[in-house]
Image (cartoon, helix red, strand yellow):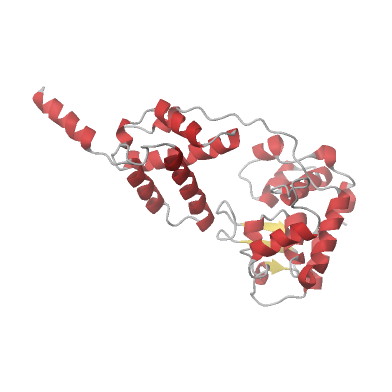
């Protein structure tokens, strides 16, 4: 009994505070993208800032109920809670592998249910407005990137990493290497006629970047120049990618082909909350 008690006490003391567990989880993920690590740090800092005493609390003694309370003490919306739960689970997974806790208590925290609203896409008039603004803003320096996002579904952070040597106009594709993509997987996207015309007009060569320096600043300024950015008309996140997906499915009618173009592992997300076929107008003309 004494030996068993001593072993249990030793096991109980073999743990670390939550702040140290976060540091270890970040170290274990140091090869991830800068944006991913930034989001990870933000969630953990907010958890510790909004929950007094969490930073110094030992991870071994934390229950699923504790974790749920900490999550709800720092975040409110279902989308925020879902993302924060994933980050907190990653922290405890690392702690469990280090032997600092007996289980991952977040695994027993219910995943927040997100009720998806209708996916918003650009109307034909809004697309024309954005492309016209991109054509005149700073001499059209952002137009190739806008074209890639609208007509190829490339994410803003992916296009920011692309260089012109990834563009093959002869064979009609853009090659996204694993280092370019959000998910870490390589893919090849098709250059359709409207995008081809934009890229041919850009007439750029060599291995320079597609986007201008300080891309984030230019992208935000272009939104405003095109008429978005006010409280009455905010810019909708991922709206260009959703517009591309909706028009692609509306015209080519293939989830498999669309899945390949956007780089998803399966079509489940596309089927549930990625496209708006009701808002598609003239799907065939979009690709001419």
Give the answer, above or below, for where 7 lies relative to 279: above
The image position of residue 184, as x and y in percent, is: 55, 54
Q: Is residue 25 visible?
A: yes
Q: Quadrant of the N terminus?
A: top left
Residue shown at 72%/61% (left/top)?
221
Q: How many marks?
A: 0
Q: Which residue shows up at 82% across the image and 68% down it?
A: 136
**Which of the pair 110/236 is nearer the observer?**
236
Residue 48 horizontal/vertical position (percent):
42, 41
Which x, y percent locates residue 154? 69, 56
Lateral position of residue 47 relative to residue 124, left or right: left
Q: What residue is at 79 percent from the left and 62 percent from the top?
A: 195
Image quadrant where residue 92 sits: top left
| Above or below, 288 relative to 55 | below
Q: Nearer the viewer, residue 34 or 138?
A: 138
In this orientation, does residue 287 appear? no
82 or 48: nearer the eye?
48
Residue at the image point whose x is 47% and y is 43% from the top: 46
């Amino acid at each position: 009994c004494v030996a068993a008690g001593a072993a249990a006490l030793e096991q109980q003391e073999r743990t670390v505070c939550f702040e140290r567990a976060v540091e270890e989880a970040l170290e274990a993920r140091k090869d991830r993208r800068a944006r991913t690590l930034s989001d990870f740090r933000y969630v953990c800092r907010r958890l510790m800032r909004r929950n007094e005493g969490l930073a110094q609390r030992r991870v071994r003694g934390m229950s699923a109920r504790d974790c749920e309370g900490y999550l709800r003490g720092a975040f409110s919306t279902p989308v925020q809670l879902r993302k924060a739960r994933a980050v907190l689970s990653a922290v405890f997974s690392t702690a469990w592998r280090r032997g600092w806790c007996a289980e991952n208590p977040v695994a027993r925290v219910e995943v927040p249910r997100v009720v998806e609203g209708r996916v918003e896409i650009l109307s034909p008039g809004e697309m024309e407005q954005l492309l016209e603004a991109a054509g005149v803003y700073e001499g059209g320096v952002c137009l190739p990137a806008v074209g890639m996002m609208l007509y190829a579904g490339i994410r803003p952070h992916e296009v920011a990493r692309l260089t012109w040597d990834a563009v093959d106009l002869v064979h009609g594709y853009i090659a996204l290497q694993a280092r370019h993509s959000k998910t870490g997987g390589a893919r090849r996207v098709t250059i359709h006629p409207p995008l081809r015309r934009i890229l041919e007009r850009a007439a750029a060569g060599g291995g320079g970047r597609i986007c201008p320096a300080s891309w984030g600043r230019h992208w935000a300024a272009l939104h405003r120049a095109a008429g978005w950015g006010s409280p009455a008309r905010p810019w909708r996140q991922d709206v260009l990618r959703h517009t591309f997906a909706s028009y692609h499915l509306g015209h080519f009618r293939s989830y498999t082909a669309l899945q390949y173009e956007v780089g998803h592992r399966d079509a489940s997300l596309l089927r549930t909350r990625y496209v708006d076929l009701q808002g598609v107008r003239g799907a065939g003309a979009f690709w001419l």
